[in-house]
Image (spheres, rainbow, N blue to C red):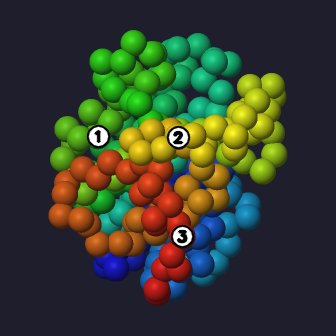
Amino acid sequence: MSNATKIIMLGATGAVGNHAAIKLANIPAVKQLTLLGRRPAENVVGESIIQHQIDIFSPTSYEPFIAGHDTAICALGVGQPSKMSQQEFIKIDKDAVLDFAFACKKAGVTHFELLSSVGVSPSSSSFYLRTKGELEQGLKELGFERLSLFHPSMIMTPTNRYGLSQALTLSVMPLLDPLLCGSLNKFRSISAEKLGNAMAINLLQNSRSIAVDDLYWSDFMALSEPLLAV
């Protein structure tokens, strides 16, 4: 296990981030879990929890809270990118995340973890994947001692949160998953709970001696299945 005991997090109100925060709140080795967000994560409780309501677009609103943390997790993201302009998407999914990461680096955070997406690339023809790829490139350039990039495909939630498109995903992916074998298994779906648990556990594990850790479906499953010894 890593000696990381103070974790700061952005995005604990989202489906995946919320599960990660709940998991971390119940691990005794986590001495402090500081949650930053536009609203409180109401179902995350515990002696280690500190919450601050901030403006995610204004680093000065949260920079004072970062000092003393060694690890950061960012699960901030847009649930339905098609429902907003490209400029708004960039502002939330790229610019706000890079601002947070820069503030963390400046404050001495050594391990930064990001909820990203499968298929991202700064040269992708897809606007969504290209923006995410540019974000990852920017994070790499900051030079964290350890950077963990989670690349899920479809994220499954217990209920339909976004209408017809998600309804189709929730019904079709369980049928497609068994067909995605070998190198294609990175495109398998995963539940928000398992992914959140994997992100939490990864924060507390020793580095695999690589600066940039790219994680996919098989990694999520390996991390989320075993019980973490604490």
Is 127 displayed left or right of 35 in the figure?
A: left
Label 1, residues with CA under 10 Å away: few <14, some 14-19, many ≥20: many
Q: Amino acid at mark 3?
A: Glu
In this rendering, the answer to whether 106 lies above or below 228 is above
Quarter of the image with the N terminus is bottom left
**Which mark sits nearer the N-terminus, 2 or 1?**
1
Which amino acid lies under the numbered mark 1 shown in the image of this protein?
A: Leu
Task: Say which of 12 and 228 sits in front.
Answer: 228
Residue on which the image places disc 3: 225
Mark 2 — residue? 180
Residue drawn at (64%, 78%) of the image: 46
Residue 102's spot in the image, x, y percent?
30, 43
C-alpha separation, residue under disc 3 versus residue under disc 1:
28 Å
- For residue 144, above or below residue 89: below
Secondary element under disc 3, as helix, strand or loop, is loop
Q: Residue at x 39, y 21 (%)?
A: 130
Residue at x 74% of width, y 39% of height? 170
Q: Which structural element holds mark 1?
A: helix
